Amino acid sequence: MKKFLKTYLPFTRAGMQSATAYRVNFLAWFMGDIMYCLVMYYVWRAVFASSGQSSFNGFTMTDMTVFLFISNITRYITESDGSYDVGEEIRDGNIAMRLIKPVSFDMTFLFTELGFKILTFLMIFVPMVIGVEIYKSIAFGKVMFHIGTFAAYMLSLVMSYLFSFYMNVCFGFMAFFLKNLWGFNMLKGSILRFVSGAVIPLALLPDTLRQVLEWLPFSTQVYTPAMIYMEKYVGWELAFRLGIQALWVTGFCLLSQLILSAAMRHVTVQGG
């Protein structure tokens, strides 16, 4: 373990240095997400007001407000740039230098991203969660924070990030064959926002569509952690959802290794 950390922790430090070097862009991106949450809040408030109903499929306006901010910060901290980074290195030829180094290909990307995620967690995630908990306490008239629920959410959050990372690495390996993934990355991001439950809670969708999306792996990235945080999943259902997440993480980790092995037989360098 000591040798492993000594090998890969420098990549984490490099990721943190990169994030601080572009801190204005870092904060601007976050402020854009906050604006998105506020816009969606007023949209949903108008929907509830015009419908005359106090809840939709178990979601009150208070629930929807919590979901908007928690799902957004969950998506923000679990999103991975793996597909973009891998695709760009294949396109410009830097992949050749990475492949000849005596380190694990995917671990170098993972630990580099962890540097960025650590800063995101401390500077954005913690203040956002504190703000949500203050809002919940005011809305319900009592402290609603439960350490057990939050621990389950954090476990789910870690698995959500690992799933997102390995899924994006798998997608990024397509660049070995397609050479450029910029357009596909844009399309993937738009689709994922919907199918992961980041735009609309899956519980509000028609039953058939909801059931299909809940069984697909993408709902584990945002929807599952958010529902755990809101205590919509408890008891055996909570354990089941966490187990499903663990299976998808394992599956995509193994799939990434298989795709990499196949891609190595087709690698060509365009730049460098």
Image (tube, grey):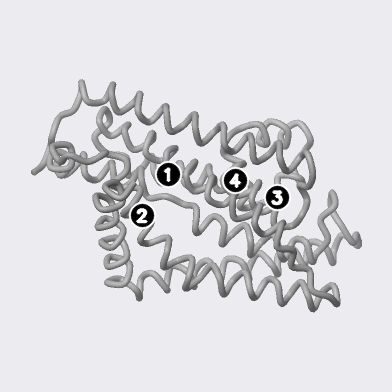
Pick the residue in front: 105 or 47: 105
Q: On the image, numbered disc 3 is attached to which residue?
A: 201
CA–CA distance in space, label 1 to label 4: 18 Å
250 relative to 36, above or below: above
Pick the residue in front: 206 or 120: 120
Label ID, residue 113: 2
Q: Is residue 118 left or right of residue 99?
A: right
- Looking at the image, tell me whether mark 2 or mark 4 is earlier in sequence order: 2
Which amino acid is tagged 1? Phe
CA–CA distance in space, label 3 to label 4: 9 Å
Q: Is residue 216 left or right of residue 261?
A: right
68 relative to 205, above or below: below
- Looking at the image, tell me whether mark 1 or mark 2 is earlier in sequence order: 2
Quarter of the image for residue 115 reads bottom left
CA–CA distance in space, label 1 to label 2: 9 Å
Does dot 2 land on a helix, a strand or a loop? Answer: helix
Q: On the image, numbered disc 4 is attached to which residue?
A: 194
Q: Are marks 2 and 4 in contact (CB under 8 Å)?
A: no
